[in-house]
Structure formats: structure tokens, C-alpha cells
Amino acid sequence: MKKTQLLIFLIVIVMVVMCMGCSDGNKSAKETNDSPIETSSEEEGDIPVGESSLVGSWKNEINFQFTFNEDGTGTFNMNGMELPFDYEIDGDTLKVVTMGAENAPDFYKFKVEGDVFSFGELETFSSTGYTDEYNRIK
């Protein structure tokens, strides 16, 4: 099941990269007025959700890496292929807009517990839960 979800995630990333070639690249997440579908409260024991809890670099078991900067920008590195993005946080909802992509932003439910960043697609979260897990790079 996890391999299937990872494969779907990789296919989505490849599709976004392909769409980047069709875009003029002038729109950023800060220019969109989209808002998250829903938010929920933090669970007890979690690090408070906010930009500061995500700032830094995170790597998963197959060496994919997210870097979240304090200014709301970031990069996703997949085996040397780097995708820039903008992000915003509202509660435990992460909004990500891939730079140059003409499609709508993606929304994820996420949490940070210690040095572990977990997330899952907001739209399917009730059935899938947290599907991806990354460890903080120190």
C-alpha cells in the first residue's frame, strides 16, 4: 500500500514538472486567494504548528528532500531534480503551490513531532491518514 501511494506521489510530481514547461511562471502562492478546505486543532504533545516548526530541511527513507524557508518558499528535491514552491500554513493545513504550475494549490494535513514531519493529502485524509514521513536533517 505504501509503495502504491509513493508511486502516485511520484507520478503527481512528474506531472507538475511537465506542467511547469507550459507555464509563464509568474504566479506565486502569495498571489492566490485560495483557502484551505478545513483545519483541525493540534493534538496534545505536538510541536505548535506554524512556519517555524517546518523551517529547515527534511529527508525521507528514499532520500527525497523538502526544504522550507522562513519566507514561505521552499524546494522539493527528488534525486537531483529540484522543484521550487511557495507554501502557507493555516493551523495544521499546509498549502503548497509549485512554482510555474498553472494548476490549483495542493492542500495537506501535517504534523511535526520532534524531528519527524508527517503529512497526507487533505482531500483524502479521512481515509488515508498521514501517508508520508520525513526526518529533520540536522
Image (tube, helix red, strand yellow):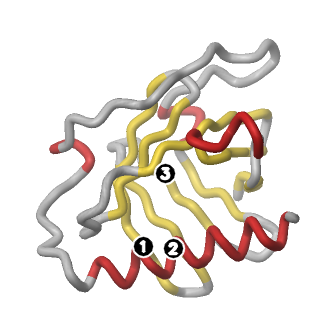
Tell me the kind of residue under disc 3.
Phe
Q: Is residue 72 above or below residue 33?
A: below
Left or right? Give the position of 115 relative to 23. right
Q: Position of residue 58 (x, y in %)?
A: 66, 57
Residue under label 3, please give it: 68
Tell me the kind of residue under disc 2.
Ile
Q: Could you give the CA–CA distance between mark 3 and mark 1, rounded to whole angstroms? A: 12 Å
Label 3: how many Cα within 10 Å (few below 14, some 14–19, many 20+): many
Quarter of the N terminus within the rendering: bottom right
Mark before the other along the chain sequence, 3 or 1: 3
Q: Position of residue 17 (x, y in %)?
A: 39, 80
Residue lying farthest right? 1
**Helix, strand or loop under label 3:** strand
Asked which quadrant contains residue 134, the reply is: bottom right
Quarter of the C terminus within the rendering: bottom right
Tell me the kind of residue under disc 1.
Leu
Left or right? Give the position of 105 relative to 133. left
Point 57% across, 41% down: residue? 123
Label 1: how many Cα within 10 Å (few below 14, some 14–19, many 20+): some
Point 24% across, 65% down: residue? 102
Q: Could you give the CA–CA distance between mark 1 and mark 2, rounded to whole angstroms? A: 9 Å
Residue under label 1, please give it: 83
Which of the two discs, 1 and 2, sits closer to the camera?
Answer: 2
Q: Position of residue 57 (x, y in %)?
A: 60, 57
Q: Is residue 111 above or below residue 29?
A: above
Which of the two discs, 3 and 1, sits closer to the camera?
Answer: 1
**Helix, strand or loop under label 1:** strand
Point 76% across, 40% down: residue? 127
Mark before the other along the chain sequence, 1 or 2: 2
Residue 13: mark: 2
Q: Is residue 7 above or below residue 5?
A: below
